[in-house]
């Protein structure tokens, strides 16, 4: 089974559609979303409609919660938005992961919120380390080692902040026991133009081009 993993879409349908097209080429059977479908971008309703058509297992993000006012995977995985400690908390560092690993009931925890694609693994002593990644022609992969807990952030579809403006998503391949990370070009200028027309803040518009 291959799962399309995405997070932090933030109303950016150009990025979302590009990721969906690339994920179809890579192949998947199910979809898991770590939240923040809305916020920042110009097309919140359209982003929600697209996600509904995917029949995605989706949890709310902090922006979704504000806009409004859980569903958990049936595999050895769980979805959280920010962290297990709280949906508004961030997992940026090994120290953040160390705080959350004792709370993880599943081997895989998919999270978002930080907009950074990353995988943290617990070593033999239970301490968090950055997981080793492997370069393939079309993606970067991290192995899911048996018995080891992993925290996996697929990166942001609509608001990348790791210095790469391309949309980010992941594929969880259960059969190969690995997480595949993909980056996808999309029409940033089109999204920016729609944001200007909606009179959204200038800094949100400009940062899309820089992935910050």
Image (cartoon, rainbow, N blue to C red):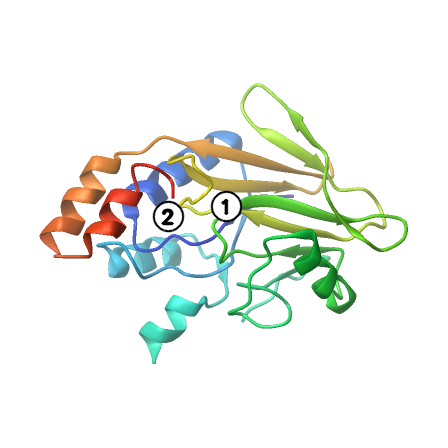
Q: Is residue 77 visible?
A: no
* Position above or below: 142 against 134: below
Q: In what quadrant of the picture does the N terminus appear?
A: top right
Q: Residue at x 50, y 54 (%)?
A: 114
The foreground one among 31 and 157 is 157
Is residue 43 shown left or right of residue 108? left
The foreground one among 142 and 53 is 142
Say few, some or many: other residues with alpha carbon within 10 Å of mark 2 (under 14 / 14 to 19 / 20 or more). Answer: many
Q: In what quadrant of the picture does the C terminus appear?
A: top left
Figure disc tally: 2
Mark 1 to mark 2: distance in Å? 9 Å
Q: Secondary structure at mark 1?
A: loop
Q: Is residue 119 visible?
A: yes
The residue to which callout 2 is attached is 159
The foreground one among 103 and 179 is 103
Q: Position of residue 199 (x, y in %)?
A: 12, 57
The residue to which callout 1 is attached is 155
* Position above or below: 63 against 41: below
Q: Residue at x 84, y 48 (%)?
A: 123
Pointers 1 and 2 in contact (C-beta within 8 Å): no
Q: Position of residue 61 (x, y in %)?
A: 45, 66
Say few, some or many: other residues with alpha carbon within 10 Å of mark 1 (under 14 / 14 to 19 / 20 or more). Answer: many
Is residue 41 shown left or right of residue 6? left
Is residue 40 shown left or right of residue 199? right
Q: Residue at x 39, y 34 (%)?
A: 166
Image quadrant in which you'd find residue 36: bottom left
Q: Residue lying furthest top in this view?
A: 137
Image quadrant in which you'd find residue 160: top left
Q: Position of residue 113 (x, y in %)?
A: 49, 58
Q: Secondary structure at mark 2?
A: loop
């Amino acid at each position: 089974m291959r799962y399309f993993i995405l997070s932090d879409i933030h109303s950016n349908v150009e990025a979302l559609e590009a990721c969906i097209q690339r994920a179809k080429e890579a192949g998947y059977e199910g979809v898991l979303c770590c939240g923040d479908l809305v916020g920042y971008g110009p097309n919140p309703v359209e982003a929600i409609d697209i996600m509904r058509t995917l029949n995605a297992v989706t949890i709310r993000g902090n922006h979704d919660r504000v806009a409004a006012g859980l569903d958990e995977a049936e595999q050895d995985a769980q979805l959280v938005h920010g962290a297990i400690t709280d949906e508004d908390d961030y997992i940026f560092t090994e120290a953040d992961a160390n705080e959350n690993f004792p709370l993880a009931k599943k081997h895989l925890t998919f999270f978002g919120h930080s907009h950074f694609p990353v995988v943290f693994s617990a070593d033999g002593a239970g301490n968090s380390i950055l997981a080793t990644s492997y370069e393939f022609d079309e993606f970067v992969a991290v192995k899911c080692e048996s018995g080891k807990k992993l925290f996996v952030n697929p990166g942001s579809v609509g608001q990348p902040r790791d210095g790469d403006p391309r949309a980010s998503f992941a594929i969880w391949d259960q059969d190969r026991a690995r997480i595949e990370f993909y980056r996808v070009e999309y029409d940033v200028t089109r999204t920016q133009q729609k944001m200007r027309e909606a009179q959204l803040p200038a800094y949100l518009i400009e940062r899309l081009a820089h992935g910050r």
